[in-house]
Amino acid sequence: MSRRDTTMMLSSLVEKRLNNRVAYWASEVSFDRATPNERRIDYMGFKPFTPGYVTMPASVELGEFSRYEIKSCMEDFTSGHGLTFYGDVNYLVTTRELAEQLRVTYRLPRNINQVLTPSKKGDKLVPLFDVSGKCPSYRCRGASEMLYAMIEADGRRTRWKSIARDIAS
């Protein structure tokens, strides 16, 4: 499978997982735009804190942000792009082969909770390694900033789809 095909397959599995686990999600979420520290997260999900399924004023601030970084091959992993992990829960999504290679060479990133790989049937993501340790959260940004970045990412995607539709007509 090519690098592009692998990335598309892993992305599809992340989207399926997010649709089943969080209330809101976005792809290609950027932080620190127009600065030398600009970072883009492949996927980010948000699940508000709703004990007993009741929304309350603190539901946003106490909610959980999950981040997913997809790496299709070692070249992708060492490219210098991505590997931004500062959500409450962080996942590295990759093939089983790359995950094993990273483990035996001691290259698994810090600040991740789990390494997810496709199941044997290839229909969902399953944890291969749980490396969360004792840290309850890696979040270093406020909920409002993170939600704004998700909304902005979705808006950019919507605008590009609209432009593509206009060009095609």
Image: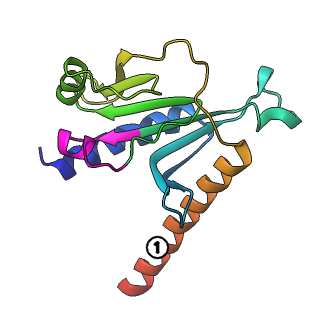
- Asked whether 36 or 128 is in front, the reply is 36
Q: Is 152 placed above or below 100 here?
A: below
Q: Amino acid at mark 1?
A: Trp
Q: Residue furthest right?
A: 57
Residue 111 located left or right of residue 117: right
- Asked whether 161 or 61 is in front, the reply is 61
- Asked whether 169 or 9 is in front, the reply is 9
Which of the 4 quarters of the picture holds residue 10?
A: top left
Residue 169 shows up from this direction:
no
Query: Which region of the structure is painted magenta?
Result: 69-81
Q: State the quadrant of the N terminus.
A: top left
Q: Residue furthest top?
A: 134
Residue 62 located left or right of residue 109: right
Residue 42: where, in percent of width, then height? 42, 48
Colouring method of the image: rainbow
Residue under the image location 39 percent in, 86 percent down = 167
